[in-house]
Image (cartoon, helix red, strand yellow):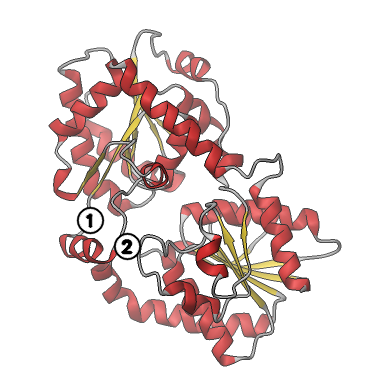
Amino acid sequence: MKIFLIAGEASGDTIGAVLIEALKEQIPGDVQFSGIGGPLMKDAGLDVLLPMDQLNVMGFFELIPALPRLYKIYQATLAEIEKQDPDIVVTIDLPDFNFFIGSGLKKRGKSKAKIIHYVAPTVWAWRPKRAHKIAAFLDGLICLLPFEPEYFEKHGLKTKFVGHPIAQEVQDGDGDAFKKSKGIPGDAKVVGLLFGSRESEIKRHGAIMKETMLHLREKHDNIYVVVPTLPHMEYHVLNLLEDFDFPSYVVKEKEYKWDAFASLDVALAVSGTVALELAYKGVPHVILYRMNPLNWQIAKFVIKVRHAHLANIMMKETVVPEFLQHQCKPDKIAEDILKLMDDPEAIAAEQAAFEKLREMLNTGDDESSSAKAARFVLEITKG
């Protein structure tokens, strides 16, 4: 069996890696995995034809100059899929590129592969007409959230809610052991800074987050900083923190990530997957996000939900404080972080909401989301 996969972001690389492992467990005999992915998918057995960072472009106005290159990649990817003639094509998130691949394959009609997309597009947040359009070329859709299937099933698309992969990724971790290994005193306040997975994100948010820490020090003089990050971000993080006047520990190793999370009293995070990880782990936190002003105006026009954090969207209220665009003011951000450092009621309110979120992201059984997803992929293929 041949399976072609496409992922374009760090979160997609994680999903793709565990899906490959689950498929290997469920498929008897030999199976070949090839496509576009990252280091985790490569370690899981993917023959990487193109590194996924070649697809990673953020924002409408950043996309325009990249279009000629992306179009060449699009054409080459279609040709490669048709040449390899896989049984299955699994596209993971990155809908703007992956849906062009899916629709292109169907229009050209040279590939017999079943096309399955993993991570439903957020039609409930913006561009709802996509649900009808993607049902025309997808054979199956894997959803992470329980309310998503109904948006697509009414258009005849086979869907499966498998639960969020974060449920199998998050581990308990030993915060006390982590602090002991770093020499962090037991009475210290440990603040996590999570700068995102892209160099552009650290450039937009790094200075704001550092200045926020200075405001925190006006109230607390015993603060230690822990910075969980990804290996490809370590250089940029270390450069940013070179003049940072706080005892700081950058953690890039995957095996220490959850110990680092468990050591945190509170965190400040760039909005994204890592904020959901903090929520699932039960770490009180605040998020921020800035983008190109023109991109922001477009986003305000097309996005139909009031919040950025998935916990807030699913709870339908502001559980986690959000500081977006012009609201990214260090003194105001620090005020909300201080509440989560000193106010037991504020901490309890966030953690109660996080408990509800965990229940919503789980399917109610012990089987992993990747195992469910792999079974769905194979059912669609056989069907």
Residue at image position (18%, 26%) is 335
Residue 176, image x, y percentages = 50, 15
Q: Quadrant of the N terminus?
A: bottom right
Residue 273, image x, y percentages = 43, 47
Label 1 with label 2: CB-CB less than 8 Å: yes
Taking 290 as reference, is 380 above or below it?
A: below
Q: Quadrant of the C terminus?
A: bottom right
- Which residue lies under the disc numbered 1? 291
Mark 1 secondary-structure assignment: loop
Quarter of the rendering containing residue 269: top left
- Which residue lies under the disc numbered 2? 58
The residue type indicated by label 1 comes to Met
Q: Residue furthest right?
A: 29
Residue 95, image x, y percentages = 45, 68
Quarter of the rendering containing residue 337: top left
The residue type indicated by label 2 comes to Met
